[in-house]
Amino acid sequence: MRSFIDLDATFSGQPRELGPVLARIDTGRGREQLFEDQVPQVLRQLTENARIMSITASNAIEGVIVDSDRALKIAEGAPRFRNRNEKEFAGYRDAIDGLMRRDLHEPLSLPLLLHLHRQLFEHAGGRGGHLKSDPNFIVSFEAGHREVVFSPPPPEETEFYLREAIDRYNAAKRDNVGHPLIVIGALILDILAIHPVADGNGRLARLITTHELLSQGYGVARYISLEQRIFESKNTYYARLFESQQGWHTNEHTIWPWVSYLASILSGAYDDFEERVAQARDTVGSKQDRVRTHILEHAPAEFRRRDIDRALPGVSPATIRLVLNELRDAGRITVAGSGPGARWRRA
């Protein structure tokens, strides 16, 4: 709740460079409906790609890794799991799917937060849905030993802090005290500082971020994986969070390092979104050009042919195979294995 105690102090001093980033984000939000009307098939394909990437990346940030083949099967609804990682993977699948299916998003509340946490661990033994009962600390091993870098409020104070943060956030949102993304950023900073649950705080915070972005009309979270962008910049993610948490207990912290980072993630997502839509609508470049550009500039460093199939609706498998072989022969990509399960990697 600390970020919402003194609103004038928290929301004053906005960095000058943040303004154009927020303007870019709002421009992107304004174009979403246009794309939904013009290229619905492309957006459906982007949604499925983003879904799988988000489930995979948000878990990977916390060290929960699932083999890519199994990840795809679980994302598609495989009912059996081989280990705990797969169970937690399925939990994030259920939670993110629930958020993405909603047309109307209920106001954030403590019961909703606990519901999302319960979903995260529903397949892994039912430990979700409860606030922490023991102290938890944010630690670092960068110096070669365990070092506590932030001490969240103790368990007996957690519910009070969390309810206050949510109530004050909803009031700030209702009263339009700042740009929606700034207010969302302040909320997520507080939730991560409170660290309200024993396990899954990062994943829970990312789910709440998605919920609030969608509720405020920032639908890019449906089409581009914000979790993947965070995973790719996770060192910066932790550094900016650390900067903004300093002085949090005494309300002497600054939200701007963290909010600026979150804004950069969203702005980059809109740039990526519009570029992918433009590629799909482009009638000048050949389909082979589209495949070539996607593989060399947009696909993950390692991918499978089916990943390209999903990313480029309307392009035939034969065209994709042709370009893959051409790039392999030119030394631009390498391949391990054969057939549909082959793993391709940019050289």
Image (cartoon, rainbow, N blue to C red):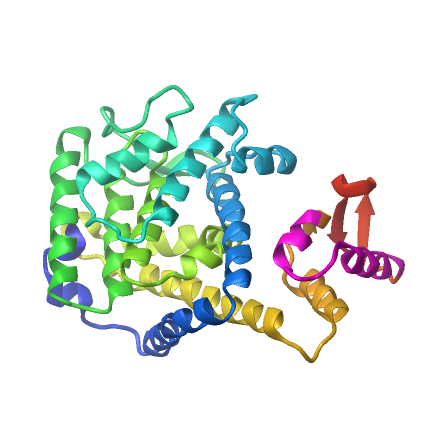
Outermost residue to the right: 329
Res 152 visible: no
Q: Quadrant of residue 297?
A: bottom right
Res 90 visible: yes
Residue 39 at what x, y percent from top left? Answer: 52, 68
Residue 57 at what x, y percent from top left? Answer: 51, 45
Whether residue 216 sits left or right of residue 52 in the image: it is left
Judging depth in this view, the residue of 266 and 105 nearest the camera is: 105
Q: Quadrant of residue 336?
A: top right
Rendered residue at 31%/50% (across/down): 211
Let me know if residue 312 is in the magenta part. Answer: yes
Rendered residue at 46%/43% (across/down): 58
Residue 37 at what x, y percent from top left? Answer: 44, 70
Rendered residue at 30%/74% (across/down): 15
Q: Quadrant of residue 66?
A: top right
Write down the region rendered in magenta. Answer: 306-329
Quadrant position of the C terminus in the picture: bottom right
Which secondary structure type mostly characterizes the magenta part of the structure? Answer: helix
Above-or-below relation of 48 to 202: below
Above-or-below relation of 182 to 201: below
How many numbered circles are shown?
0
Residue 267 at what x, y percent from top left? Answer: 43, 68
Let me know if residue 137 is in the magenta part. Answer: no
Rendered residue at 19%/36% (across/down): 111
Judging depth in this view, the residue of 309 and 192 nearest the camera is: 309
Whether residue 306 sits left or right of residue 190 in the image: it is right
